[in-house]
Image (cartoon, rainbow, N blue to C red):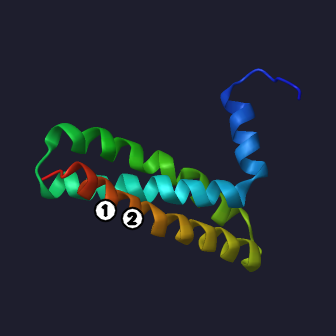
Amino acid sequence: MDMKKLNMTNILSRIEEKKYTSAFFLGIISDFWMMLYNYAVNHDWIWLQAPLCFGIPFIGFLISKWFIDNPETSVRMKIVFWQACGNTIGTTLMLLFVRLFKIV
């Protein structure tokens, strides 16, 4: 296996090659992140709200880019499908996280 220098360009090109898998995992991360942000807002955790809110646009950037850049409806639907699957898992993980750690 060729060990390339790890930089942002190489990471982004790898993510671009595997866009459906990446959409799935970004869906998990983004939904977990958003649910945690909503939980922080509801419980007035100001110390957690600001950093979570700052990261939200960066998480959704790639998925938005892929959706807009692909004119083919089938590719767009695959991206939406895999992100929706990831969102379902992300929400479930957030609820389990709150229940496991009994965060109030």
Q: Is residue 55 left or right of residue 1?
A: left
- Given the current orientation, which residue lies at the most extreme front position? 100
In the image, residue 93 lies at what x, y percent? 40, 59
Residue in the picture at 67% in, 77% down? 77
Residue in the picture at 18% in, 52% down? 102
In the image, residue 53 lies at what x, y percent? 31, 47
Tag of residue 91: 2
Q: Is residue 42 left or right of residue 100?
A: left
Q: Amino acid at mark 1?
A: Leu
Q: Is residue 80 above or below residue 102?
A: below
Tag of residue 95: 1
Label 2 secondary element: helix
Residue in the picture at 75% in, 42% down? 14
Q: Is residue 95 left or right of residue 60?
A: left
Q: Amino acid at mark 2?
A: Thr
> CB atoms at circles 2 and 1 under 8 Å apart?
yes
